[in-house]
Image (cartoon, rainbow, N blue to C red):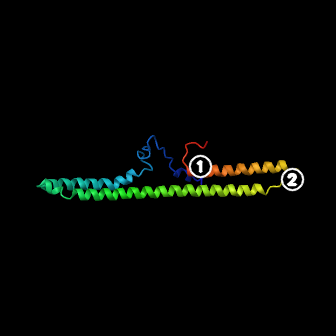
Amino acid sequence: DFESGLWRIMIDYKHGVWGMGVLLKRRGSVIPKALVWSLPCAIITVLLHQSVESEKGNDSLEMEGIMTIWSSFTFVLGFLIVFRSNQAYSRFWESVTLFQQTSGEWTSALSNLLSFCRLDEEVNFEVLKFQQYLIKLLSLLHCSALQTMCELDDDS
C-alpha cells in the first residue's frame, strides 16, 4: 500500500490552537458540503421572510405562539445534547474498561509465562535474559496499543 501511493489518501489534520484549524481547511472539511445545503435554504428563508413582511399588518398576531415554539425547540435541542453527551461518555468508559481488561489479560499471560520458567542454576542467566525480553515485548505491545488509540504529534 505504501508503494502504490494509497498512504497519501489520509489527511493529516492540524487542529490549531482552539481546534478551528480543521474547520477552516477546504480539503477534508465538512463546511463546503454543509454550505451546499444550507445556503439555498438560507436564501429561500430570507426571500420568504421579505415577501411575508411586505404583506404583514398587525405585528402582535405574528408573535402569538412563539414562546411555545421556542420552549419546544429548546427542550428537543437540550434533550439531544444530553443524549449524545451521555452516549459519548458511556462509549468512553466502555473503551477504558475494555483497554484495562485487555491490559490485565496481557499481564496475566506474561505472569503465567514467567512463572513456568526454569529455576536451574546452570541456565539462570539465559532464563533471566528471556524474562527481561518478554517484559520488554509486553511493554512494547502496551505502548503500541496506546499509540494506536491516541493522537500524538510525535511518538516519543
Is the residue marked by circle 1 packed among few (<14), some (14-19), or many (20+) residues within 10 Å?
few
Residue closest to the eye, 150 or 3: 150
Residue closest to the eye, 120 or 35: 120
Q: Which residue appears farthest toward the left when viewing the image?
A: 57
Left or right: where does residue 115 sit relative to residue 60?
Answer: right
Q: Are marks 1 and 2 in contact (CB under 8 Å)?
A: no
Locate the C terminus by quadrant.
top right
- For image coordinates 43% across by 55% down, the residue present is 85
Left or right: where does residue 5 sit relative to residue 106?
Answer: left
Residue 147, numbered label: 1
Name the amino acid type tagged 2. Asp
- For image coordinates 52% across by 51% down, the residue present is 10
Tell me how many marks there are: 2
Is the residue marked by circle 2 packed among few (<14), some (14-19), or many (20+) residues within 10 Å?
few
Residue closest to the eye, 135 or 9: 135
What element does badge 1 sit on?
helix
Q: Quadrant of residue 79?
A: bottom left
Q: Which residue is mark 2?
A: 120
Left or right: where does residue 127 sit relative to residue 143?
Answer: right
Residue 39, given in percent of the width and then of the height, sits at 30, 53
Residue closest to the eye, 115 or 63: 115
Name the amino acid type tagged 1. Gln
Locate the N terminus by quadrant.
bottom right
What element does badge 2 sit on?
loop
